[in-house]
Image (cartoon, grey):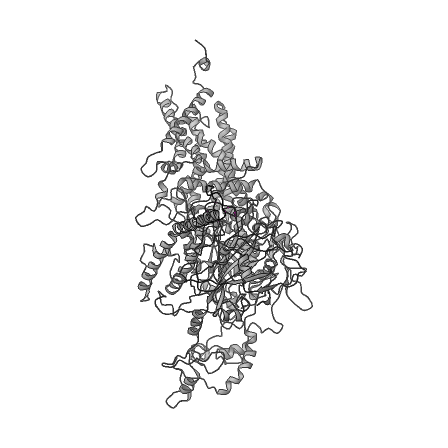
Amino acid sequence: MVIKTTSSSPSPPVTIMISSGGGSRGKGLVNSTSPLPRASFSNDNHNSPLRRRVSGGGGGGGGGGGSNNYCNSSMSKEEIATTTTMEEEEEEMNSEYVSYTVHIPSTPDRQPLSNSQTSINEEDCKNNNGSKSYISGTIFTGGFNSATRGHVIECCSTERDEEQSKSVLVCGMKGCDEVAIEGGKSSFVCECGFKICRDCYLECYGGKNSNGRCPGCKEPYNYASDDDDNDDDEERNSEAGDKALPLPSMAEFKLDKRLSVVKSFKAQNHPPDFDHSRWLFETKGTYGYGNAVWPKDGYGAGSGANGFEHPPDFGEKARRPLTRKVGVSAAIISPYRLLILMRLAALGLFLTWRIRHPNREAMWLWGMSITCELWFAFSWILDQLPKLCPVNRVTDLSVLKERFESPNLRNPKGRSDLPGIDVFVSTADPEKEPPLVTSNTILSILAVDYPVEKVACYLSDDGGALLTFEALAETASFARVWVPFCRKHQIEPRNPEAYFGQKRDFLKNKVRLDFVRERRRVKREYDEFKVRVNSLPESIRRRSDAYNAHEELRAKKKQMENGSDVSEPIKVPKAIWMSDGSHWPGTWASAEPDHSRGDHAGIIQAMLAPPNVEPEFGTEVDAENLIDTTDVDIRLPMLVYVSREKRPEYDHNKKAGAMNALVRTSAIMSNGPFILNLDCDHYIYNSLAMREGMCFMLDRGGDRICYVQFPQRFEGIDPSDRYANHNTVFFDVSMRALDGLQGPMYVGTGCIFRRTALYGFSPPRATEHHGWFGRKKIKLFLRRPNVSKKQEDVVVVPINSDHNDDDADIESLLLPKRFGNSTSLAASIPVAEYQGRLLQDLQGKGTQGRPAGSLAVPREPLDAATVAEAITVISCFYEDKTEWGKRVGWIYGSVTEDVVTGYRMHNRGWRSVYCVTKRDAFRGTAPINLTDRLHQVLRWATGSVEIFFSRNNALLASPRMKFLQRVAYFNVGMYPFTSMFLIVYCFLPAVSLISGQFIVSTLSATFLVFLLGITITLCLLALLEIKWSGITLHDWWRNEQFWLIGGTSAHPAAVLQGLLKVIAGVDISFTLTSKSATPEDGDDEFADLYVVKWSFLMMPPIIIMMVNMIAIAVGVARTMYSPFPQWSKLVGGVFFSFWVLCHLFPFAKGLMGRRGKVPTIVYVWSGLLSIIISLLWVYICPPSGTQQDYMNFKFP
């Protein structure tokens, strides 16, 4: 039986085949046997370069060829054919694929698909005992040389029917189980919302023993008759204009000449913003002297004039800002700026004096010192100028709730009008990034305090590991317990590992009597969850060994049946097997073809399907429910596992490529207008963090903001912060200062993006800065409304081909070049732009707003064809000949893709905002081991060198970037080069002590006064920075120390690697930073701090320390035994050597380990290098009074 239905989206044809299997159903994610019928569909990927049939396990094979008609503008509507499988098709398909079944743990949002979602009609469902399909039970695979396939499980609807029966409104009268009257069907339902059936109502209202009062609120019923039911149609017609406006459908989007055009969705006869008569009726307002007034208590019981209060100011709601900018106190910032000028003048006078007073006795020493000092002064200016305008910002969450989540004329039910947010979490290696850490991050996202239906979480597994996949499935199962528990008891933080590991009193501010009991139950469930996740590697290994052994026996048996030589070895691939007995389509430990880290198919699995719009409440405690959720919304946000396709002949661009794959996938599946990206070890510490960020995006002027950056906060750092892991000077000083300019830089995690900004769009308004220091400003309006005869609002969203072409439109012929051939992706762009607009009452000049309540409608349902389209956009060949990575999405070509991506947005005229919340928004982990920390700094510095030698250098920035913002970005590319001068300057004190010379001829009073003035101003500046930023003196000193450690170890290596890449084209390898797992009870939390891992980056600091210590000993000995001691030169040299050693002290402690033992290799290398340097110095500068023939070799 074949039933054809018209597809709502221009997607390739999808065939769904149904097979059956027997057995018992298990509790885990996947089972090899199931009593439920199974369905799987395959999507012929017409866009694949290799359209050939490939068979494979786990969705990796199959698929027929066809003409390459993907994204053809002339193609007709395609159809989805649903057929039942026959014996011939089962013989043709691989047996492993046919028997494959995915079981997702039972979650509240596992709802049956609607008619537009399901691929199996009602007759088939009846034949299959009422089973239905679920998108959350389907794993989709596909890619370069394989067809798109999905393995769908049909679940019985009996449990769902029971849940629906429980959710039916029942009469609240004791002893009555009749269906209650719905509030929208009758006017005699009480305003208090008490549920009552028709018979009980008539008895309460007009019965003999009744008093005409509501049993719930005890207030009298309003008069109503049975004839009121006849007016339902008229009421619904009158309220039709008050309902929320529907969102534009991507399916209805037509590819006209201008694909970027978004038309207004306002009806011609739309009601005004404020209906005076309606307000008067609903609020029981009364007429005074010609005006409506607001009674305070009942009618006329107020305390104002004539017993009434003044009417409410409805315009105040629109005028109240969501955010405020708070400047630094003038008592602090004015002296701070004055000190900067004073130190700048002191540096100028000091360098002038140094140049005019050279040391004639040691010109080489004077030349090196003055060169380094000039560079240090230049570097200090680049670092200090952007700090002239620091600001602080605060948000008002009550205004956000009032404006977007309160009932109004366009949104009578008070549904959330907030825009959707897609959350991206990236991971690449389950060995370096433990799955338990990633699972806790996912749980904190699922429990965030944001409308459930507006959140979608995507996990990018760039390693394609089965361990990550099954750990995410376990996380989805545990979330049905953890998320309702967090919502019920207002848990903070909502990371279970962090919450249960807190050492403070967990009973503080808790008033519910069942909290302790339920916390104990959830804690036990979490412990069991941890055990399950930790046992997954061993479980997968044992399962795979068993299946591989079985395959070897089958191969041996087949060899004997064929009469082949039994002695010949049989090569059976060491596959990774899923629980249902099928091959994992991702990476295998044996790295077989099509199953290695750089060669595997694309995978998409919706672990949790999109939730309903209406809240769903749970049940009381029973055998299956650990906590009472009768008054708690138990819905869960959508959760999707994504592993993009990888092939050896393609460059996958590391993390930036994975992020762009998530951008395309989310655009098709959820299309949230805003995107939050997090590292796998950065969890949401403040459940209101998303709301805090959205305050900036939705406030007046927020349409010019491309992203909101949050500061990074870290846990698990040693109390002394030996290696400046907190990095508070950067996050609390530099980033706050940039917020007063054009905005902070993007630092790779904890950032909310505007999707249209990631697409390469220009802001609606921008300012060009010309003249000296950008003092001449030119306002630009880049989106102009075109008013047609029909008075429709039309907004053109430009993507500039270059800096000068600011008003270029998106043409239909350019879309495939910019975004690829996916028509669904192209259709999602104007929808995301519309949803990200400001409200109409906030729009300013040159902007286009959206009506209030336009986002309070359900999203489009997620169907199988949509997910199949998402598989296509994560294929390895999709980005070929497109703008992805060049101007669209995360930018390629640098290991620090975050800084480059933010720079490109600022270069187009966008602004960014720094959001520092009272309670930390996000928290993560940082490497506390010395070697790991140095490699992390090496990667950052290497990216900066790449930026300096690329077209992203701030010297080439457009006029839309402010002058001081350009200085800040230029400093990002310049700071690694300071290391060359820093290394030379660290050796100068030792050279001075050994040679007996100094950088100046004599320590004159002028030199000492200049030196003292520069030092005092530096200390005063540090104190004022501490004052307005909130950091501590200890943080500032640790930052200074690690500046020298990194500048003498990682930064020189970064400069060398960058030069090799630019000159010789040597590619730079990327080292993934290891994420430390949570220590178990009894383990040392800071054990990694004392582990010594040898690295070549440690050599320069070790040499500097040894040479300076030897030089101090030599200088002291020479001065003490000299007949004419020069104590001034000794003091100068020892002072600067001591300055160097103080900065390197944390590095020396790291080499000593826990017990203070230095590895032998350190002594060996240090001794050899010190001897070599000493001999070279003696050869270059021999002692005075010695003969020169001592270096000549003569035969006896």
Q: Is residue 1129 above or below residue 649?
A: above
**In the depicted structure, whether residue 929 falls above or below residue 864:** above
In the displayed orientation, state which residue is furthest to the right.
789
> Seen in the image, is 633 located left or right of residue 44?
left
Q: Residue at x 50, y 35 (%)?
A: 349
Image quadrant occupied by the N terminus? bottom right
Q: Main secondary structure of the magenta part?
A: loop
Q: Quadrant of residue 1105?
A: top left
Q: Nearer the viewer, residue 1029 or 282?
A: 282
Q: Position of residue 1027 (x, y in %)?
A: 42, 49
The one of 906 and 571 positioned closer to us in this rendering:
571
On the question of residue 688 being in view, the answer is no
Q: Let me know if residue 587 is in the magenta part.
A: yes
Q: Is residue 86 left or right of residue 492?
A: right
Residue occupying the point 59% across, 73% down:
270
1012 left or right, relative to 56: left
Left or right: where does residue 1030 sit relative to residue 378?
left
Residue 547 location, x and y as percent?
43, 51
> In the orientation shown, which residue stands out farthest toward the top?
1196
Residue situated in front as seen by the camera: 832 or 285: 832
Figure label count = 0
Depth order, front residue of 1070/1003: 1070
Q: Which residues are magenta?
A: 586-599
- Give me the residue at 50% from left, 85% from top: 228
| The residue positioned farthest toward the bottom in the image shown | 208
Instruction: Tell me, yes or no, whether the highlighted magenta stretch contains residue 1076.
Output: no
